Amino acid sequence: MPHALSCRALALLFLPPLLLLSACDSTPRERQAVAREGLSKLDTVARSAGRSLRRVGSAAARLDSSNRARKSQPLQTSKQVAADQYLLGPYQNQLGALTPATIGSAYAQLLRQTRASRRQWSARDWDYAADTYKRLNAELARVRLDLPARDEVRIRAWQAEFKALQANRSVKELRTLTGSPPANAPAAHR
């Protein structure tokens, strides 16, 4: 069957030029009708794309507005302590005193808990996790010069994973607002 597909592809590739060559055998009215039909199809596609862009733009603006409103509210200290306890476990009380020997384990704990809970987290839960992550990064900056390169590479990979999980949440929120299917969804579900 691959040969049949390539023949079809070639036919589609060479058909428009053949139509142009055969235009000598057509009348100006026929060519105008073909051109009108092509422009009509192009116009329909452009209108559809415009509606999609408006829908996505509107959803992005709503998401941005709700994010700004949520982030303008300060995090509650008691909830941040609870988030730290959950995300960092035994390393919660060591923030400010982590060493090059313990900071890798603190990042590993943070990522383990994030992977386990991320699907149930609200946007506000992500705010608390991001604050914990930010403070852990400050600890890394403090001990980085004494950190072996292999540990720093592993920590950088965990940082990238945390940011990817966070970005995935934002994409899912936007997709929910726009009603768009996931990029890897079968074409029948799009």
Image (cartoon, rainbow, N blue to C red):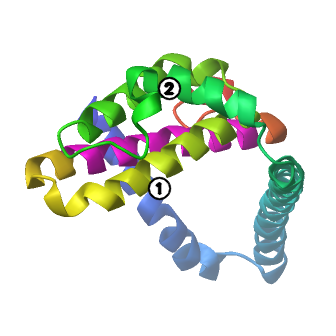
Mark 1, residues whose alpha carbon is within 10 Å: few (<14), some, or many (≥20)? few
Q: Which residues are magenta?
A: 154-175
**Where does the image place residue 152, in percent across and percent down from the top left?**
20, 51
Q: Is residue 172 magenta?
A: yes
- Mark linked to residue 12: 1
Give the residue at x 52% y 78%. 21
Report helix, strand or loop for mark 1: helix
Quarter of the image with the C terminus in it = top right
Give the residue at x 64% y 43%. 171
Q: Is residue 67 magenta?
A: no
- Mark linked to residue 87: 2
Q: Is residue 51 left or right of residue 128?
A: right
Marks 1/2 in contact by CB < 8 Å: the verdict is no
Report helix, strand or loop for mark 2: helix
Quarter of the image with the N terminus in it = top left
Q: Is residue 114 visible?
A: no
Give the residue at x 42% y 47%. 96
**Where does the image place residue 148, in percent across and percent down from the top left?**
9, 52
The amino acid on which the numbered mark 2 sits, given as a three-letter code, is Leu
- Mark linked to residue 64: none
Q: Is residue 6 visible?
A: yes
Q: Closer to the camera, 17 or 151? A: 151
Mark 2, residues whose alpha carbon is within 10 Å: few (<14), some, or many (≥20)? many
